[in-house]
Amino acid sequence: MGILLRTRAAGDVEQMDRLDCDAELLDNTYRQFGVVNRALSGWRRLYTKELRTLAHPDQRPITVLDIGSGGGDLAVMLARWAHRDGKPLHVTGIDPDPRAAAFAGRRTPTPGVAFRQAHSGDLVREGSMFDVVISNHVLHHLQPGELAQLLADSELLTRRKALHNDLIRSPAAFALFGVAALPFRKSFIREDGLTSIRRSYTRAELRAVAPPGWSVEQSSAFHQVLAYRRG
């Protein structure tokens, strides 16, 4: 692995995480995430494999909690895919960042999708439970204690499984994203995306921090899932 990517850049900070970042560029970033996640995050495959096959005997909606939902694009994508497939699904997106929650709240309402500003711990204290708990590109943002808390909360919040999808740090991912993100202008997409890759885990590193009961599974060529499955 190249010298730049040999170790995690855990201390680097993405521009959109800075409280004083440019508000217009931040809004553009949330808006462009929909294109990036649809094309690159591997969620269509995860939806088909992990969510589309779930059902309740009484046809109640499968409930999904999207932790760190950002601008809400993933929650909306999942709900729309499920609607097209005739699958009852309800997605709750939570994010502690008031800027993300505000952006998600301004979206055109989508049936089967709700957003709120909250931490996973808030829902644990409320006694909430969901069939599936997910996150996308969240793990690499967290300090060790925060990661441990997220995974502990996920175990308490899910009835069936938790799927935390994140990037894999590699020279190929860094180089290809650097080129693929060139068309995204007036946002933090390219700069923060490259920082995200530097902050992300290799498979071996993620396995090393995974607690008992969790496994690291390949999601796509440049993504991996930290998964917890009941039963």
Image (tube, rainbow, N blue to C red):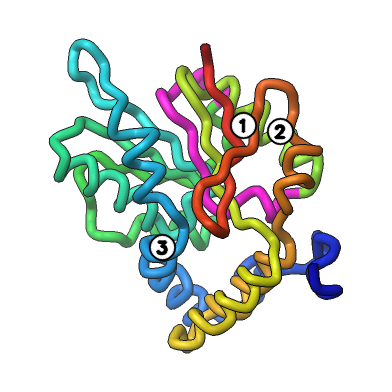
Which badge, 2 or 1, comes first in the chain's sequence?
A: 1
Q: Dot 1: within a 10 Å radius of its alpha carbon, few (fewer than 14), some, or many (20 or more) residues?
A: some
* Left or right of residue 62, residue 185 in this image: right
Residue bearing mark 3: 103
Residue 115, image x and y in percent? Answer: 38, 45
Q: Amino acid at mark 1?
A: Gly
Is 128 a magenta residue? yes
Q: Are marks 2 and 1 in contact (CB under 8 Å)?
A: yes
Give the residue at x 51% y 47%. 219
Foreground mark, 2 or 1, reads 2
Foreground mark, 3 or 2, reads 2
Q: Quadrant of the N terminus?
A: bottom right
Q: Is residue 128 visible?
A: no
Q: Which residues are magenta?
A: 124-142
Residue bearing mark 2: 149
Residue bearing mark 1: 121
Residue 227, image x and y in percent? Answer: 57, 33
Along the line of sight, the residue nearer the viewer: 202 or 26: 202
Q: Amino acid at mark 3?
A: Phe
Give the total of numbered labels. Answer: 3
Give the residue at x 78% y 46%. 205
Give the residue at x 49% y 59%. 100
Image quadrant assignment for residue 208: top right
Q: Is residue 116 above or below residue 53?
A: below
Q: Is residue 165 above or below residue 180?
A: above
